[in-house]
Amino acid sequence: MQTVIYRLGLTGVGLLLAVAPVRVLGGEALQAEIQHMLLFIRSSQCQFIRNGQVYDGRQAESHIRRKYGHLEGRIRSAEDFIKYAATQSSVSGRLYLVRCQGREMPTHEWLRAELAAHRRNSSGKGAGPVE
């Protein structure tokens, strides 16, 4: 697993900030995580809000899958998939939102929680986020 480190310059003093680990996967493992997230979106009973319009899981998955197809060369991790294909509109810049059981949140947060749950479950621990 790779930990991403950012260097921030603060008045001439360098500060290192470690953030959440990013799992850089190749080939089949990466595709398996991405396909899991696409299936999670598709099978969800949640509503997806893109540029003010509400979509169901099938419509959201179709849109994100198409977007992923255009960006696939930039995607090196499941986190990249979320960041580039499932976070915001590339046209308007507006965040994608998801509404589940009356609670609304940015889609990228919802997918990060699912990805973490999926990884825990793959290693035999934990349960997934609310659908």
Image (tube, rainbow, N blue to C red):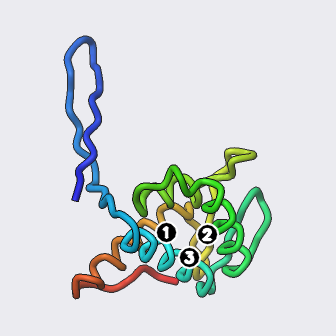
Task: Name the residue type under label 3.
Answer: Leu
Looking at the rendered image, the quarter that the N terminus falls into is: bottom left
Percent coordinates x, y for residue 22 in the rendering: 31, 56
Q: Position of residue 116 (x, y in %)?
A: 34, 71
Task: Name the element at disc 2.
Answer: strand
Total marks placed? 3
Q: Is residue 45 left or right of residue 36?
A: right
Q: Quadrant of residue 8?
A: top left
Q: Residues within 10 Å of mark 1 (few under 14, many from 20)?
A: many
- Cα separation, mark 2 vs mark 1, equals 8 Å
Residue 110 placement, left or right of 69: left
**Rendered residue at 51%/50% (across/down):** 74
Looking at the image, is mark 2 or mark 1 earlier in the sequence?
A: 2
How many angstroms separate mark 3 from mark 1 (CA)?
Answer: 13 Å
Q: Is residue 55 above or below residue 107?
A: below
Which of the labelled discs sits on residue 38, or is there none?
Answer: 3
From mark 2 to mark 3, how far is it between C-alphas?
14 Å
Numbered mark located on residue 110 in the image: 1
Q: Given this view, does label 3 or label 1 mark the residue nearer the observer?
A: 3
Residue type marked 1: Trp
Of pointers 2 and 3, the one earlier in the residue sequence: 3
For numbered disc 1, what is the local secondary structure? helix
Residue bearing the label numbered 2: 98
The answer to whether the residue labelled 2 contacts the one labelled 1, judged by CB atoms less than 8 Å apart, is yes
**Depicted 91 relative to depicted 112: above or below:** above
